[in-house]
C-alpha cells in the first residue's frame, strides 16, 4: 500500500458548465485538462509513494478512459459515489471502504460527520478567529446602521421588486430599463467607495472586466459556443448591458486615473482565453494583470520600477 492516498471527488454532474463530456477532462490549455493539474501536484511521487482514488458516477466513462494515460505512472482506483450521500463530503465517505485503517486529514470547512473510519481534525484556532472577526464586524456602528436601514427601508426600496424581475429567463424584457438601473447603481456604489477611500487617503482604481460575449470571437473559445450564447438569454443581457454602458458614456463618470476599461483587450486575440464561460485562463490572466500594472504606473498611484 502506498504511503499517500489521495481522494479526488469527480462525481459532480457539471450542470453549470453544460459540457457534453465530464468537466474534469475540460481543456484549460492545449493537451492539459482540469484533472491533469490535480495529478501534477503529485508529480514528484512515484507509484509506490502515492495512489489515487477517484469517486465518480456512472456517467464518467470518458473520464476513466482519459485517465488510462496515467496507468504506468500512478496506481488509480475507482469507486462509485454512494447516492445516499451528498456533496464532496459524500465523495470521501463513498471511498472509505477502500481503507483498512484510519487516516488523518486536516479539514476546516468539512462537516464533522465523517464517521469513525476517519480521524477528523478541526482547525479550532481559525474557526475562533473567524467567529470573533464576524462578531466584531456586527458591533461596528456603520454596520449596525446599515442593518437598521435595510430593515426600515426594505419595503420601499426599488431594488426589491426590480431585482426580482431579473430572476428566471425574463432578461430581455425591459432590458433598457434594467441596464439603466444597473449602471446607476454601479456608479453610486463606486462614488461611495471613492469617498471613503479618499478620506483614508487610499487610491482607487475601478476596472471594467472583459467577458466572452463582447469584443471576442466565440469561435476561439473552448468553453462557450455561439450556439450556447444564442440559447441563454442571460448571456445576451450581459452583452446588451456592456453595450449600454458604452452607448451612455459610462466612463465619463470617472476621473481618468481612477478607471480602466479592459473589455477591448481581447478584440484581436485569436486564441482561447477562458477556462469556462466566466473565468480566464493563465495567459489572459497575465494579460489583464499587465494592463492593470501599466495603469497603476500611469496614474502614479505608487512608484513602480
Image: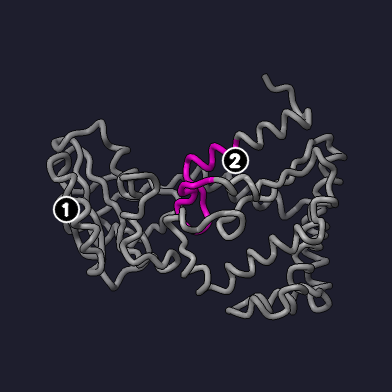
Q: Position of residue 52 (x, y in %)?
A: 22, 47
**Dots 2, 1 in contact, CB < 8 A:** no
Q: Mark 1 or mark 2, which is nearer the start of the sequence?
A: 1
Q: Dot 2: few (<14), some (14–19), or many (≥20) neighbours within 10 Å? A: some
**Looking at the picture, does residue 164 appear above or below residue 89?**
below
Q: Which mark, by number, is residue 273?
A: none
Q: Position of residue 34 (x, y in %)?
A: 35, 49
Residue lying at 79% horizontally and 68% vertically, measured from the top left? 180
Q: Position of residue 284 (x, y in %)?
A: 52, 42
Q: Which residue is mark 1?
A: 77
Number of marks in picture: 2
**Looking at the picture, does residue 204 appear above or below residue 298?**
below
Residue at the top extreme of this rendering: 305
Query: Residue 54 occupies which quadrant of the picture?
Result: bottom left
Q: Callout 1: helix, strand or loop?
A: strand
Give the camera-side residue of 179 and 37.
179
Residue lying at 66% horizontally and 46% vertically, measured from the top left? 262
Q: Is residue 1 magenta?
A: no
Which of the image's four quarters has the C terminus? Answer: top right
Query: Residue 150 occupies which quadrant of the picture?
Result: bottom right
First to last magenta residue range: 269-289
Q: Is residue 270 left or right of residue 209?
A: left
Q: Which residue is mark 2?
A: 288
Give the camera-side residue of 261 and 169.
261
Q: Position of residue 77 (x, y in %)?
A: 16, 53
For marks 2 and 1, give the CA distance: 40 Å
Q: Is residue 41 left or right of residue 186?
A: left
Query: Residue 171 occupies which quadrant of the picture?
Result: bottom right
Residue lying at 16% horizontally and 50% vertically, measured from the top left? 68
Amino acid at each position: 500500500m502506498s504511503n499517500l492516498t489521495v481522494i479526488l471527488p469527480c462525481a459532480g454532474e457539471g450542470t453549470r458548465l453544460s459540457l457534453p463530456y465530464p468537466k474534469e477532462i475540460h481543456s484549460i490549455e492545449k493537451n492539459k485538462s482540469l484533472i491533469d493539474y490535480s495529478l501534477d501536484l503529485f508529480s514528484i511521487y512515484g507509484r509506490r509513494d502515492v495512489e489515487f482514488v477517484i469517486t465518480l458516477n456512472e456517467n464518467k466513462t470518458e473520464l476513466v478512459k482519459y485517465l488510462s494515460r496515467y496507468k504506468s505512472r500512478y496506481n488509480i482506483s475507482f469507486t462509485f459515489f454512494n447516492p445516499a450521500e451528498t456533496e464532496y463530503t459524500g465523495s470521501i465517505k463513498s471511498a472509505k471502504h477502500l481503507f483498512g485503517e484510519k487516516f488523518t486529514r486536516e479539514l476546516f470547512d468539512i462537516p464533522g460527520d465523517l464517521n469513525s473510519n476517519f480521524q477528523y481534525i478541526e482547525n479550532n484556532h481559525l474557526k475562533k478567529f473567524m467567529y470573533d472577526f464576524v462578531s466584531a464586524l456586527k458591533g461596528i456602528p456603520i454596520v449596525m446602521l446599515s442593518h437598521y436601514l435595510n430593515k426600515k427601508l426594505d419595503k420601499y426600496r426599488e431594488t426589491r421588486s426590480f431585482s426580482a424581475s431579473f430572476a428566471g429567463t425574463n432578461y430581455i424584457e425591459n432590458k433598457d430599463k434594467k441596464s439603466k438601473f444597473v449602471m446607476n447603481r454601479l456608479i453610486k456604489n463606486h462614488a461611495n467607495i471613492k469617498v471613503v477611500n479618499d478620506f483614508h487617503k487610499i487610491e482607487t482604481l475601478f476596472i471594467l472586466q472583459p467577458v466572452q460575449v463582447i469584443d471576442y470571437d466565440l469561435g476561439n473559445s473552448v468553453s462557450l459556443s455561439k450556439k450556447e450564447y444564442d440559447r441563454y438569454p442571460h448571456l445576451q443581457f450581459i452583452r446588451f448591458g456592456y453595450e449600454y454602458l458604452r452607448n451612455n458614456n459610462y466612463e465619463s463618470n470617472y476621473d481618468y486615473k481612477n478607471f480602466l476599461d479592459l473589455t477591448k483587450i481581447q478584440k484581436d486575440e485569436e486564441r482561447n482565453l477562458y477556462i469556462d464561460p466566466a473565468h480566464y485562463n493563465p495567459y489572459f490572466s497575465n494579460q489583464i494583470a499587465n494592463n492593470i500594472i501599466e495603469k497603476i504606473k500611469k496614474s502614479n498611484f505608487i512608484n513602480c520600477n
